[in-house]
Image (cartoon, rainbow, N blue to C red):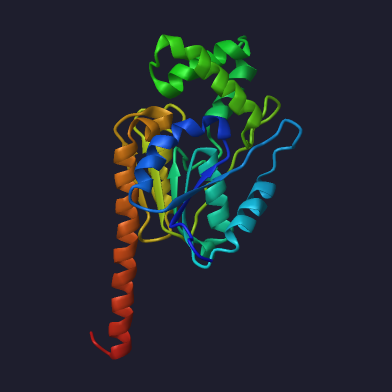
């Protein structure tokens, strides 16, 4: 297949895609990156299997493995795909995905809705500050509406009736896990525990000095640099392994 991109950004939260744009813009300066989007309609039942099938159909024509990237639940989809089809994935980058990959902002939102005697708007307003720090006051209501729309249109494991928990999912491909030191959803403990489940020698963990849940929006250049450093380290590792194999074949110690 001609013009195959080097990387594919996954998005199952189309309402929140504006938070991805600064990072994608920076990544696009150094590599060819495409976007794959999945929209959940109000009439559809939530199904990760359907999303996985559609993603696999999309990647089938590609003649080589590709770098997959995703934030939060989009990253979870990439994790499930890399676990099921490792031969199709060159590397996987997860942003704001903890070792318990089902934990996202919606999981915390529905937990609070079930526990607190507050209406939706009040809790969503709290999450605007929890996820974004201190946005301008004239933007708070617009952001509340944005989160409300995400509840309706994004792929999710959670609802007001129940939430799904997943055990840690290991993958055989190089894995980069990124998060923020001040993220209240995926805290540093959730990030550090990933290291117990790294299977590939090139897998890495990086914690951003700020930015909370959408740290890739506030620190796009730093995140982009880490991703490119990760990709380059994979190239160096493959070259080292290849040279060692040649030496073994040639009988050189």
Residue shown at the point (42%, 54%) measured from the top left: 198
- Residue 190 occupies which quadrant of the picture? top left
- Residue 57 occupies which quadrant of the picture? bottom right
Residue 56 shown left or right of residue 251 in the figure: right
Q: Observer-nearest residue: 67 or 157?
A: 67
Q: Which residue is most to the right?
A: 43
Q: Residue 133 in the image: x percent, y percent? A: 39, 19
Q: Residue 129 in the image: x percent, y percent? A: 44, 17
Residue 139 to residue 243: above or below: above
Q: Which residue is most to the left?
A: 253
Residue 234 shown left or right of residue 159 in the figure: left
Residue shown at the point (68%, 30%) measured from the top left: 162
Quick check: can you spot residue 27? yes
Q: Residue 232 in the image: x percent, y percent? A: 31, 58
Q: Residue 93 in the image: x percent, y percent? A: 43, 49
Residue 85 shown left or right of residue 174 in the figure: right
Residue 197 shown left or right of residue 157 in the figure: left
- Residue 191 occupies which quadrant of the picture? top left
């Amino acid at each position: 297949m001609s013009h195959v991109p080097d990387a594919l950004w996954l998005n199952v939260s189309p309402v929140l895609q504006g938070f991805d744009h600064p990072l994608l813009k920076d990544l696009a300066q150094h590599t060819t990156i495409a976007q794959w989007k999945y929209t959940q309609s109000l009439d559809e039942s939530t199904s990760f299997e359907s999303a996985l099938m559609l993603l696999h159909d999309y990647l089938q024509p590609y003649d080589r493995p590709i770098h997959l990237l995703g934030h939060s639940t989009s990253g979870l989809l990439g994790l499930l795909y890399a676990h099921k089809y490792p031969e199709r994935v060159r590397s996987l980058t997860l942003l704001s995905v903890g070792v318990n990959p089902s934990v996202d902002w919606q999981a915390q939102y529905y937990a609070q809705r079930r526990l607190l005697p507050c209406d939706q708007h009040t809790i969503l307003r709290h999450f605007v500050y929890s996820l974004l720090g201190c946005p301008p006051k004239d933007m708070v209501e617009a952001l509340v509406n944005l989160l409300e729309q995400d509840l309706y249109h994004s792929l999710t494991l959670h609802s007001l009736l129940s939430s799904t928990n997943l055990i840690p999912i290991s993958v055989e491909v190089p894995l980069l896990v990124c998060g923020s030191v001040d993220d209240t959803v995926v805290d540093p403990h959730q990030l550090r525990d990933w290291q117990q489940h790294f299977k590939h020698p090139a897998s890495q963990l990086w914690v951003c000095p700020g930015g909370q849940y959408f740290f890739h929006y506030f620190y796009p250049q730093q995140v982009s640099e880490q991703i490119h450093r990760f990709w380059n380290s994979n190239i160096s590792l493959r070259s080292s392994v290849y040279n060692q194999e040649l030496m073994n074949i040639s009988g050189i110690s």
